[in-house]
Image (cartoon, grey):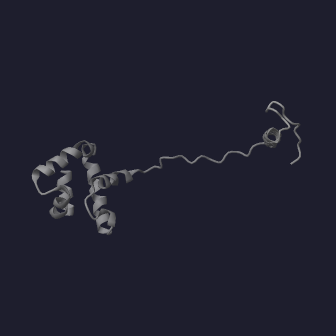
Amino acid sequence: MFFSRLTTIYGRGKVKSLWGDSEDQLKVMRKEWAKTVGKFSFEDLDIIFDRLRQKLADGNPDYTWPDIPKVLRLARTNCRHASHQVLPRGLPEPESVKQRRMARGRLAVQTAKAVLAGSACSLEEKPEVTHEN
């Protein structure tokens, strides 16, 4: 039914030029796509072909030729809800937490500078923490 509807919409000329002229080639094509197409209900296929006809009527160049994966993807636009959830913004961190985080950062920078300058042999020899800027 799927391939006959594609043939009806696109015409035998386009279908034959893509998938061959013989009935055997069409059988191979049907067999190849049977599992994928078989997952869709008749209602889903109706939705797919309604959307396909609308795309063709709108002159969408992506649907000029029958492309089975592209046609089947038209079913995915049937979602009514977003697949992600927008969370509310978190509260700003308290000033005390910010000050501790800044002090740890300054200590890490001072330690790295001391190690690179050669005034400290290891990270265990940490410089004094100053709370300015």
x, y percent for residue 65: 26, 62
Give the residue displayed 25% in from the left and 41% down from the top: 35
Return the x and y of residue 124 as percentages of the image width and height: 81, 30
Q: Residue furthest top?
A: 124
Q: Residue at x 84, y 31 (%)?
A: 125
The residue sitting at the left extreme is: 23
Left or right for 94, reference 68: right
Residue located at (83% from left, 38% from top): 118
Name the residue nearer the viewer: 114 or 75: 114
Q: How many marks?
A: 0
In the image shown, does 90 or 128 lie closer to the viewer?
128
Q: Quadrant of residue 109?
A: top right
Left or right of 88 on screen, residue 119: right
- Vertical arrangement, residue 16 with respect to residue 80, above or below: below
Q: Classify residue 53 by image quadrant.
A: bottom left
The image position of residue 21, as x and y in percent, is 12, 57
Whether residue 92 is situated above or below residue 64 in the rendered picture: above
Q: Residue furthest front?
A: 118
Rendered residue at 59%/46% (across/down): 87
Query: What is the x, y in percent for residue 71?
Result: 30, 55
Residue in the foreground of this view, choosing between 77 and 15:
15
49 vs 122, left or right, is: left
